[in-house]
Image: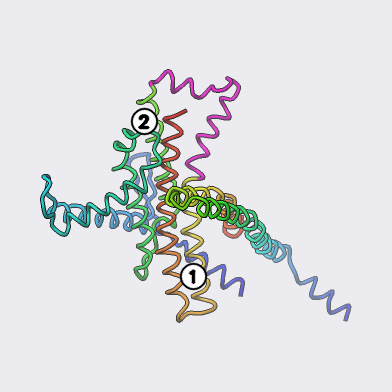
Amino acid sequence: MFEQLAEMLAHLGGKRIVVLSIGEFSMRFDLVATITTWAVMLVLVLLALYLRRGLRQEIEEKPNRIQATLDLLIDLLRKQLTSNFASERLAQEMFPFISTLFLYVLLCNWVSMIPYVESPTADANVTLGLALLVLVMSHVLAIRMKGGKKYIHGFIEPYPFMLPLNIMGELAKPISHGFRLFGNVFAGSVLIAVVTAKFAPVIVPPALNLFFSLLMGGIQAFVFAMLAVAYINVAVES
Amino acid sequence: MLQEAQSVVSQISGADIATAAKYLAAGFVMGIGAIGSAIGEGNVAAHALDGMARQPEMEGALMRTMIVGQAITESTGIYSLLVAIVLLFVV
């Protein structure tokens, strides 16, 4: 029984690796995750382009339906995602980035509800890449807002001998940030696979899928965006 | 009886014991690792609920902070999951 289970779990993370080599460099792509992430991006971009057509720049007496709905949704996103920023200006500036991150992770989590599609966030490479994006963003913002001298000085605070500790702390952030999302989504898919294959293949899996994909996927996307906000805040403030 | 047991024991190889230990260790890591984060997340929720009961107008902000706090508390559980995955598939 254990061997069967192990075999099944090994298939769960089955990867199709494509190696692209240019001269001496070779890059390895996970085909499934790459295609899924690009499909998610395509859906988001097409949805944005489609919804944009109904929008009006000037304020009207009676907005059309798309305008009213989007106003409501964007207001909700703005209130939930950016109210933790340190300053109003930073919140204004970072809202597109944070909301895009949120919507992308949300759709990546929800895509696993389509049969035979695995959510790309169950792949550690995707989540760690997103976490690195947030890390680079926070440091670029910190340099821009505080200036290079003050930014470098931030690493030797409160004492110069704390420098290695500070650098380690900065490097630990994206690792815990990325693995948090990966762990949650992957654990959900493992649980669904085990229950489906071993115990109850009929009614229980859809309910589990609903819980892990819809509910936990939404919460984890929110948490990912909120932690990005927190990291950017800390980098800009201190 | 004793001889039978001895013959069974002699059939078990070191690799079998290593495999069994791997599965056992993965189960223990996940089970024990989940205790801490479960208690921690319960604490966070309890105190957030306290705050909400005292100041219902703060509910939105408390809810947001609670979810982020729980996510951070969860990291120990996630790390134990990673250790379990490494034990199962890598070691």
Type of amino acid at the residue the image marks with label 1: Ala
State the image coordinates of residue A4 (x, y, percent, origin top left): 56, 73
Q: Could you tell me which secondary element the residue under label 2 belongs to? A: helix
Choose top left, top right, bottom left or bottom right for residue A169: top right
Chain designation of label 1: A
| Furthest-right residue in this view | B2
Tell me, yes or no, whether the two marked residues, 1 and 2, touch with CB atoms within 8 Å: no
Q: Residue at x 49, y 23 (%)?
A: A154
Confirm whether the magenta stretch covers residue B24. no
Magenta extent: A147-176
Mark 1 to mark 2: distance in Å?
A: 41 Å
Which disc is residue A193 wearing?
Answer: 1
Q: Could you tell me which secondary element the residue under label 1 belongs to? A: helix
Type of amino acid at the residue the image marks with label 2: Leu
Q: Residue at x 60, y 57 (%)?
A: B38
| Residue count near mark 1 (Cα–Cα under 10 Å), binned few <14, some 14–19, many ≥20 | some
Q: Is A10 or A216 nearer to us in this picture?
A: A216
Q: Is A27 or A237 nearer to us in this picture?
A: A237
In the rendered image of this protein, does residue A215 appear above or below residue B70?
below
Q: Residue at x 27, y 50 (%)?
A: A74
Mark 2 or mark 1, which is nearer the start of the sequence?
A: 2
| Furthest-top residue in this view | A149
State the image coordinates of residue B68 (x, y, percent, origin top left): 48, 48
**Residue at numbered disc 2:** A141
Majority secondary structure of the magenta segment?
helix
Q: Is A129 or B30 nearer to us in this picture?
A: B30
Chain designation of label 2: A
Looking at the rendered image, the quarter that the N terminus of chain A falls into is: bottom right
| Residue count near mark 2 (Cα–Cα under 10 Å), binned few <14, some 14–19, many ≥20 | some
State the image coordinates of residue B21 (x, y, percent, origin top left): 70, 62
**In the image: residue A161, left or right of residue A88:** right
